[in-house]
Structures are given as C-alpha cells and as structure tokens.
Amino acid sequence: MISTEYQDIEVAFNKIDNLNDLELEKLCEKHTLNQPELLEYILSASVEYKNEQLEGLLVYYFCLLMEIRINKAPLELKIDEKSIVAFEDQFLNVINEYFENEKIELLEEYTDQGELVKFMIIEISTPDEDGSKLDEETAVQLFISSIAMIKLLF
C-alpha cells in the first residue's frame, strides 16, 4: 500500500504549478506515454458527459496524480483496459453509494487514499486565485473521474 500524505500532494502541486507551458506539455507527454490507456479512459468522461471544459481539467489532474504516484514509488505496471474493466463495476457501485449517503469515509476507505480524496474535495469546491469556481456539474464530473484515477493509480 502506498500512503499519501498532504506534503506529497503539495510537492507535486508546486512542481506542476511552477512549470512553463512547454515544460508542462513535456511532463504530460511523459505521463501519457507511461499510462496511455488510463488517460484515454479518463478523457472518455469529457466525451460521455459532453463537457469540453472537463477535458483540460482531467489532463491537469492526471499529470498531478501521476506526479504524486511516481514520487511515492515507481509505477511499474501499465494500467490497461483489462484492469479498467475489472475495476469499473465496483467503482460505480461505490460512487453511487457515496452520492446516496454522502459519506466521505466510504471513498477514503475504498481508495485507501484519504488525503487525496480530501484534496480533491477542496479542489472542486474552492474558488481559484482569480475567484472563479467550477460549476456544480463539472465539479461533480471531475470528482468522479479523479476518484477513478486515484483508485487505479494507488
């Protein structure tokens, strides 16, 4: 089990936020080459939800979560379609149960990554530095997708 602490999130967050556009593009390329099927799966959410804004957010959080993951321990296995298919039924059941009961502990236990779950809740509910905030629909879609990434990566 990989235990993620707040400082792990902060290190990756600071790294990504201090990259220029070219550096960020190269980092995204690197992570995409390492986990192409995971990124494809995650990006399918923006198509499924018909939400173009979600795509850029998913790429950003994919890179952030990949950074956190590889900083903790090398990610030796590629997440493939077989892994994703095996994960989906239980994931959907847990997500449905979460939205019925709104118990964050359910997601913390399911992912075994309480700090990452809390971080994503803060991310989707807190306005950016410029005061902008995600609309509720996009926030929920990003949250669901990020929980999927967390479960698959950690």
Image: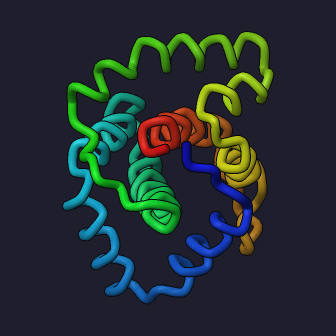
Q: Which of the image's four quarters has the N terminus?
A: top right
Residue 106 at what x, y percent from top left?
Answer: 72, 22
Quadrant of the rendered structure where residue 93 is? top right
Q: Which residue is found at the position 36% from the left and 40% from the top?
A: 42
Residue 145 lies left or right of residue 30; in this view the side is right
Q: Which residue is found at the position 77% from the left and 29% from the top?
A: 104
Would you say residue 81 is visible in this rendering?
A: yes
Residue 105 at what x, y percent from top left?
Answer: 78, 27
Q: Which residue is found at the position 25% from the left and 69% from the top?
A: 29
Would you say residue 60 is visible in this rendering?
A: no
Question: Height in image: 124 above or below 44?
Answer: below
Question: Height in image: 70 above or below 122?
Answer: below
Quadrant of the rendered structure where residue 25 is? bottom left
Question: Height in image: 49 above or below 26?
Answer: above
Q: Furthest-front residue in view?
A: 1
Q: Which residue is found at the position 72% from the left and 42% from the top?
A: 114
Q: Which is nearer the eye, 137 or 69?
A: 69
Residue 131 at what x, y percent from top left?
Answer: 76, 67
The image shows a total of numbered marks equal to: 0
